[in-house]
Image (cartoon, helix red, strand yellow):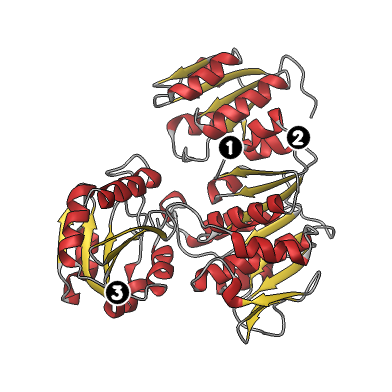
Amino acid sequence: MSADHQKRIVILGAAESGVGAAVLAQKKGFDVFVSDMGTIKEKYKKELDAYGIPWEEGGHTESLILNADEIIKSPGIPDKAPMVQQVKAAGIHIISEIEFAGRYTNAKMICITGSNGKTTTTSLIYHILKQAGYNVGLAGNIGRSLALQVAEENFDYYVIELSSFQLDNMYDFKADIAVLMNITPDHLDRYDFEMQNYVDSKMRITQNQTADDAFVFWNDDPVVRKELEKYNLKAKLYPFSEFHETDAIAYIEEREYKIESPTPFNMEQEELALTGKHNLYNSLAAGITADIAGVSNEQIRKGLMSFAGVEHRLEKAGRVRGVDFVNDSKATNVDACWYALESMKQPTVLILGGLDKGNDYSHIFDLVREKCIGLVFLGVDNSKLHAAFDSFGLPIVDVLNMKDCVDACFRMAHPGACVLLSPCCASFDLFKNMEDRGDQFKACVAAL
């Protein structure tokens, strides 16, 4: 699509992705306007002003929005937002920032999605490629916005973490390597509580792929396998599994990490920097992806051995008088908490709670019975948690702020125990976001 000066692009939402899209649109000669229902952070206002891009905050002016040729919507804004409904009624095309940025770069796109593990896998792939000397950018749900990097950098590769919300407004964009970690119920509140709508959204990662492209996926996920039967994918398939089965090309066998193709690779499982079963999947997906991207075996090994992990994902937050504290604030759904509990080797005090997204807690019942010595509910409305766990006979405390939460946990724990923040829920009832929740947790532990 050629940009001429008359074409107007309006951007809804002025955070990382929106501001990046605005800068790129401005550079490409569009008439640009940015509108945000809330308040725009100071640093983003400065950035918009530096480029002379007009913006508004605290509401949407219809006349300045409904005259757009195309709208770029922040992934955080739901389709049921009144302004989005008006835009749709006016027949204006809505795209995501990733879709827009993709039009202006020929870089190879490595895209990762999944309900769990995507941030770790994305960071690990980026780490391996960067360490191997690739000219590579990190974008999407993590790092700087893709649009801003396309506007200001000149990378040959991008490693992009994609949420289902970003995928929802992507149409012509294509991943050269698509990675799908798993599909478990998450964000169902945004998909009319219809699991299939969410599944369809995740499968969009494969759209537009050709025979020259690669699709890396977890072979043991029943949802993914069922979906694959419906699709006639042209991309070359690279399934990974914990076990050496007939059709997985990457797996663990006799404590060895193995990849069969495109280039055979193996290393001792205990040499992997990341531990725990869920991280095996992340390491397998990352290794195959690096292999497909042409990274040498020596560099893949080096990358898998030297990776330091991701903040707020099973992050060690300290030890106080023999009690370990682990920050897993990124666990905003039940399955993420399942993986965290599954990796616990000590008696555990578990912190749950926040904004429930249609959670089914029965998935973690067995692990809670097996591993937990106490529960602390950190949320405005904990009624669903009480209904789920009160019958377990464990000590339970309700709290409304992080200091009281950490104090309650410390009282429940004993030397040799672990306090795990793995809340299953979004953080917006009491915190700015999951990072804020994790940072407060670490600060309170440090103050004990």
Q: Secondary structure at mark 2?
A: loop
Alpha carbon of mark 2 to alpha carbon of mark 1: how far? 14 Å
Q: Which one is in front in this view, the residue at disc 3 or the one at disc 1?
A: 1
Q: Is residue 15 left or right of residue 172?
A: left
Q: Position of residue 363 (x, y in %)?
A: 37, 72
Q: How many marks?
A: 3
Residue tagged 3: 368
Under mark 1, the amino acid is Arg
Q: Residue 288: horizontal and vertical position, in percent?
A: 71, 66
In the image, taking residue 405 as reference, residue 286 lies left or right, namely: right
> Which residue is located at x 36 percent, y 50 percent?
426
Residue appearing at x 53%, y 46% in the figure: 165
In the rendered image, residue 321, in percent from the top left (x then y), is placed at: 22, 63
In the rendered structure, which disc, 2 or 1, sits on the residue that comes first in sequence? 1
Disc 3 marks a residue whose amino acid type is Val
- Determine which residue is flagged by label 1: 144
